[in-house]
Image (tube, helix red, strand yellow):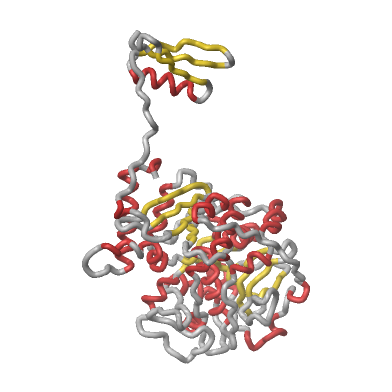
């Protein structure tokens, strides 16, 4: 009996998973296929010849396409993660930071930025994730010709840290006594350092409505109070406070500018980690929205400026346009500052209920700029009893050496999600022109080419082949 080879292979494949298929060569030269199952044997067929076909292996990349740098981890995160996924997300960041890994960890939220905001090239990775409700991580390495996805998989800390050879850091929570800094009356504490102006009642609703409410974002899910205890156990204030990278110390009524800058700092850290952290100048905002050193300012004005023109980094970090952090109210912003300021723009959302605010702080780990007792601060998370916030009065005020205080009530406010288009494009595209002749193109050109390259590779290989 003659069977063509494809038929034999199909039979072999059908038995491979559940049973054993054995092939015997007979004395006369024929080949007999026998299936064994549960101690019994069954003749499958007789064949003139048998060809062994090894599993196909991808070709070795050409020499000039080998990785030329450590690359980066890119986490595509939904607006709503499970507790385990959110913990894995933070554990990966903490571990990379603890060993000062040269591999940046960039987390992207899949919310849609306002149409006036230019989407950076990294967001194209979202199209490669089949289940948009789950966190997914790509390890992308630069080569001499193009970025290449080396590995990808679900948001899992053990797997992802194994890719890059970084040991997991286990966090231990410490005790916190909230009483000394609970419901502090700012006017009595340091009245001279206040400065958040109250909007006229008729304008309050209009101001909060100027930004998209976070509840309206596609896929956003608040965390119900029935689940808060489990989240607080995983994310105590002593853990989340590590995300505060720079404790500012205002010396005038410029709290709105400083709180705005602190919000951008926390947002950039949560997007790109320690490797990418930059100090942001609160005074570069206050000089635009305050009338005098101690006049104070309106929080919605800061939100509009952050969305429209951005903010400047602190002097000494090597940017073309920088500004002092706490002084220089009478100084003019440097000519052409908008070119640097736009790198630190943010999409602005409003948060006006507790369960949505809990998701923003405890899961996304972004903060909301609020006004309280003629002062502006950043509410960050929940302790299990009270809401905690970051103040701008230096490390000798508040808890944990980071100007942290506590409040027994919830306040509505603005959330800033930095876009960081240009700077993140540098991290992703810096290796691309290394072997190309001619003048080095600008970073913006590289970022655009990076996005086009990803689309070309995706079209040639197909999503399932990444």
Going by the image, does 353 lie left or right of 426?
A: right
**Quadrant of the frame with the C terminus:** top left
**Quadrant of the frame with the N terminus:** top left
- The answer to which quarter of the image holds residue 400 is bottom right
Q: Residue at x 77, y 76 (%)?
A: 180
Q: Residue at x 71, y 63 (%)?
A: 173
- In x, y percent, where is residue 35? 49, 15
Going by the image, does 1 lie left or right of 200?
A: left
Q: How many marks?
A: 0
On the question of residue 78 being in view, the answer is no
On the question of residue 140 being in view, the answer is yes
| Residue that protrudes farthest toward the left in the picture | 438
- The answer to which quarter of the image holds residue 438 is bottom left
- In x, y percent, where is residue 29? 35, 12
| Residue that protrudes farthest toward the front in the picture | 27
Q: Residue at x 39, y 61 (%)?
A: 69
- The answer to which quarter of the image holds residue 436 is bottom left
- In x, y percent, where is residue 146? 32, 55
Q: Is residue 358 above or below residue 131?
A: below
Depth order, front residue of 106/264: 106
- In x, y percent, where is residue 358? 64, 60
Q: Residue at x 59, y 84 (%)?
A: 250
Depth order, front residue of 299/29: 29
């Amino acid at each position: 009996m003659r069977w063509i080879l494809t038929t034999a292979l199909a039979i072999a494949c059908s038995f491979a998973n559940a049973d054993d298929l054995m092939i015997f060569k007979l004395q006369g030269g024929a080949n007999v296929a026998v299936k064994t199952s549960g101690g019994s044997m069954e003749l499958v067929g007789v064949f003139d010849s048998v060809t062994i076909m090894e599993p196909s292996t991808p070709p070795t990349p050409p020499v000039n396409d080998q990785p030329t740098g450590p690359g980066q981890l890119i986490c595509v995160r939904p607006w709503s993660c499970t507790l385990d996924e959110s913990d894995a997300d933070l554990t990966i960041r903490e571990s990379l930071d603890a060993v000062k890994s040269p591999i940046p960890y960039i987390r992207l939220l899949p919310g849609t930025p306002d149409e006036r905001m230019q989407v950076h090239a990294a967001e194209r990775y979202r199209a490669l994730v089949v289940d948009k409700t789950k966190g997914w991580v790509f390890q992308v390495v630069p080569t001499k010709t193009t970025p290449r996805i080396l590995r990808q998989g679900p948001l899992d800390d053990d797997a992802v840290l194994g890719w890059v050879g970084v040991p997991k850091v286990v966090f231990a929570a410490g005790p916190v006594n909230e009483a000394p800094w609970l419901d502090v009356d700012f006017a009595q504490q340091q009245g001279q350092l206040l400065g958040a102006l109250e909007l006229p009642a008729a304008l309050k609703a209009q101001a909060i409505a100027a930004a998209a409410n976070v509840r309206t974002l596609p896929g956003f899910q608040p965390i119900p109070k029935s689940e808060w205890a489990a989240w607080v156990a995983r994310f105590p204030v002593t853990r989340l406070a590590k995300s505060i990278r720079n404790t500012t110390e205002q010396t005038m009524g410029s709290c709105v500018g400083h709180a705005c800058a602190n919000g951008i700092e926390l947002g950039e850290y949560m997007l790109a980690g320690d490797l990418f952290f930059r100090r942001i100048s609160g005074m570069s905002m206050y000089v635009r929205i305050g009338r005098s050193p101690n006049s104070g300012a309106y929080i919605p004005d800061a939100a509009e400026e952050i969305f429209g023109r951005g903010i400047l980094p602190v002097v000494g970090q090597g940017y073309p346009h920088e500004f002092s952090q706490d002084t220089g109210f009478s100084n003019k912003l440097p000519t052409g500052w908008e070119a640097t300021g736009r790198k630190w723009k943010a999409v602005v959302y409003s948060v006006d209920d507790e369960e949505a605010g809990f998701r923003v702080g405890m899961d996304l780990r972004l903060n909301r700029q609020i006004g309280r007792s003629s002062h502006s601060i950043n509410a960050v998370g929940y302790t299990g009893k009270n809401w905690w916030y970051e103040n701008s009065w230096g490390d000798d005020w508040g808890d944990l050496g980071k100007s942290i205080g506590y409040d027994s009530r919830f306040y509505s406010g603005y959330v800033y999600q930095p876009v960081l288009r240009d700077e993140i494009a540098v991290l992703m595209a810096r290796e691309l022109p290394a072997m190309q002749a001619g003048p080095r193109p600008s970073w913006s050109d590289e970022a655009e080419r990076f996005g086009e390259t990803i689309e070309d590779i995706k079209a040639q290989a197909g999503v399932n082949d990444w």
